[in-house]
Amino acid sequence: MAFSFLHRLLPQSAKSTRPLTQIIMSATSPNATFTEGHVPYVVNGETLKTYYKLFGSLKGSTKRPLLVLHGGPGMSHDYLLPISDLSLAPYSRPVLFYDQVGNGKSTHLREKPKEFFTVDLFVNELTNLITHLKINEYDLLGHSWGGMLASETEVRLHPKGLKSMVLTDTLSQTKLWGMSTMQLVGALGDPSINAGMAAGFGDPVKYRAALEKLHAVHGCRVSPVPKEVTFGVLDQIFGDKETGEGGDPTVSINMFTGAIAGWSIDDRLKEVTVPTFVINGRYDMAQDFVCEAYFWKVTKAKTKWYTFSESSHTPMWEEREKYMKVITEWLDHI
């Protein structure tokens, strides 16, 4: 029989929107070492390349590797690099990041039609990466859209090597994500945010400015915002803020208006058979009603839910040390 653990905090009314002012720290420790490369991924006869970055070693480790799935769709792994702390003592766990195709250092797909971008495209890419690197047992950590991808991989394939999922700041329905975003934007009471969100990619300058204001409260409350967060979250889609160069919104636009428009996994969570750890932040865009289905509706495996008291959408930055300890406690007991 499945069993669950719930860690809850103060009611919504007790929240404060003050930013966290922290000493600027590097996304990765100077002691962290990594290897990187590209894995070929064949889609409809065309060879694409998936970029990966591995901290620690897959050979000789006594601990299962943690595979980290970034959000978006349309972002890159860079903003999640603090999780590489887990590759160092006392944790000493291999941590594998990668850029999903269409993003970051992987093959970009600007000329592909909307129909090309499917959930299957990314599920199959993850499976291909695992197979190519000869990973037998592993845990998945999916952030935001990455949590959607992790859960889709489990319910579609039930991979033999998958031992648990850590779903950080994720959603079980895109409808709920939209409701949460509208609610939080409304509560901020800033007309420029409303206007920018309404404009969307029709006015990317206003849209980015609106997202920056929203994210300062509900995305990453660390001030100043770490450069890796700006680069991995916004620059990947919109380009450099000053020059506009380097941005590629292809995946984001096509997935949100196509494959994951109206997406929901709620009715399929009964098919999840691996232990599932749900994480969100007290100030998160993934409010409780956005992510709670993963806790309540996974009935065939152990579940746990933890809310970080000083975090929004990036607890790996906002409560970095605690995040690593909480994740490790989960992984070490699976």
Image: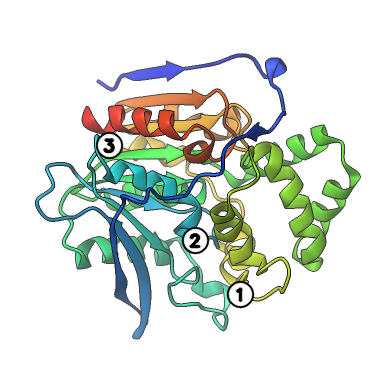
- Neighbor class of circle 1 (other Cα within 10 Å; few <14, some 14-19, many 20+) is few
* Image color mode: rainbow
Residue at image location 26% in from the left, 33% down from the top: 331
In front here: 324 or 101?
Answer: 324
Q: Amino acid at mark 3?
A: Val
Residue at image location 31% in from the left, 41% down from the top: 86
Q: Earlier in the sequence, mark 1 or mark 3?
A: 1
Disc 2 on helix, strand or loop? loop
2 and 1 marks in contact (CB < 8 Å): no
Q: CA distance from mark 2 to mark 1?
A: 12 Å
Please determine whether, in this image, residue 58 is positioned above or below residue 36: above
- Neighbor class of circle 2 (other Cα within 10 Å; few <14, some 14-19, many 20+) is many
Q: Looking at the rendered structure, which numbered label has been put on residue 246?
A: 1
2 and 3 marks in contact (CB < 8 Å): no
Which residue position holds label 3?
274
Q: Amino acid at mark 2?
A: Ser
Q: Amino acid at mark 1?
A: Gly
Q: Earlier in the sequence, mark 2 or mark 3?
A: 2
Please determine whether, in this image, residue 197 is positioned above or below residue 35: above
Q: CA distance from mark 2 to mark 3?
A: 26 Å
Residue 151 coordinates in the image, percent (x, y)? 39, 45
Please determine whether, in this image, residue 45 is positioned above or below residue 132: below
